Image: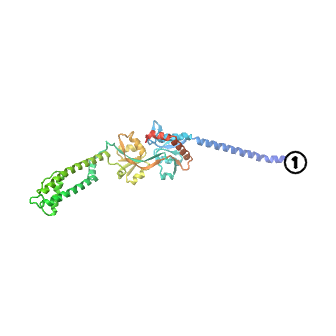
Amino acid sequence: MTRLHQATSSRARTDRLPSSVAARAIRGLMLALLIWMAWSTAQAETAKLRVATRIVPPMVVEKNGVLGGFSIELWNSIGKRLNRETEYVVLPDVSELLDAVASGRADLAIAAISITSEREDRFDFSQPIMNSGLQILVRGTAVNVEANPLRELMQLFFSRTLLVWLGIALLLILVPAHLMFLVERTHHSGIIPTKKYFPGIFHAMFWAAGTLATQADQMPRHWIARIVAVLWMFTGVVFVAFYTAQLTASLTVQQIRGPINGQQDLVGKTVGTTRGSTAKAYLSELKAEVREFEKVDDLYRALLDQQVDAVVFDAPALLYYTTHDGSRLARTVGDVFHREDYGIVFPTGSPLRKQVNEALLRLRENDTYQRIYEEWFGKH
């Protein structure tokens, strides 16, 4: 019996051995898997972030191969708070930036990227990093605007100012013309040769118009008519003085302002903007002829080379250009319109969005954001 019990116990221990080895192996594999997952997570949290951007001063500038500008300095501060290094990927335009984020070639994109409903359908955006809008850029400065005398003369002839003054002159002429007709037609040697209203009134109107413009070529004979003539000549001197001053002022303002002064003047004009810009759709609604350029520098060059009549682009970029490289070459006109916000673009569902928004709030709270803003745009 003892031998039989020992043999049975030995067989039982032998049967339990594989199960014990398998359990230890499974535990080892699970431990290894946990270690690998932790290592992968740590690597992911410390890996460089691929940030797509484009050169669009003052948001992003490049000098001697080094990137700077408002967007770059802002992101560097965000990356520092996230304890993440950054690898910048410079692309030519907004369309390329969005494609890079959508395809996974970039983890996010930052530059002058407007937040729109169409883009919100495809991507996630951070909180707005800046309030902006569109503005118009034209050639010349306030004291050096391109002149086209023939065009300006025709615009003056058909201007509302000229039509108003001609209407006033016509009404003024009718009053002395009727007084002259009523008095002079009864005088035997009066300047109105007929007693009939037509064509007698035309003779009177011709006399009144000639006296208003120059001086009377004939003096009326009736004493009442002579009093009317003297008063009318005095009125003519005052009228011509005001009329000349008004036309001179209108022409001077027109020369200073130029042919494009606001959105309404873009209709039918050739207007340049960058490829993928939100300005294209807006300009198409205005019935402007839109030309797209890949780079912002190409856009400015096209304006100076007279390939386009005007440029419509992001207001901060245009203001920066007019105060730096284009200070004596171009100027902005009109107010900022089509207001929009800039944001940082992420793939839909990216966990970085929440982290970046938290970092942005911290930067606003500790005045880092304000310091960066004032460095590039001044105090407002």
- In this view, the residue in front, 168 or 3, is 168
- In this view, the residue in front, 65 or 41, is 41
Relative image position of residue 194 (x, y in whole percent): 12, 62
183 versus 370 height, above or below:
below
Write down the quadrant of residue 305 in the picture.
top left
In the rendered view, does 23 fall on the left or right side of 77? right
In the rendered view, does 129 fall on the left or right side of 223? right
Disc 1 secondary structure class: helix
Residue at 66 percent of width and 42 percent of height: 35
Can residue 106 be seen here? The reply is: no
In the rendered view, does 10 fall on the left or right side of 25? right
Write down the quadrant of residue 200 in the picture.
bottom left
- In this view, the residue in front, 111 or 27, is 111
Residue type beneath disc 1: His
In this view, the residue farthest toward the bottom is 196
Relative image position of residue 8 (x, y in whole percent): 85, 48
In this view, the residue farthest toward the left is 188
Can residue 35 be seen here? The reply is: yes
Relative image position of residue 106 (x, y in whole percent): 53, 45
Crowd band around label 1 with a 10 angstrom C-alpha radius: few (<14), some (14–19), many (20+): few
Relative image position of residue 43 (x, y in whole percent): 60, 41
Dividing the image into 4 quarters, which one contains the C terminus?
A: top left
Q: Which residue is mark 1?
A: 5
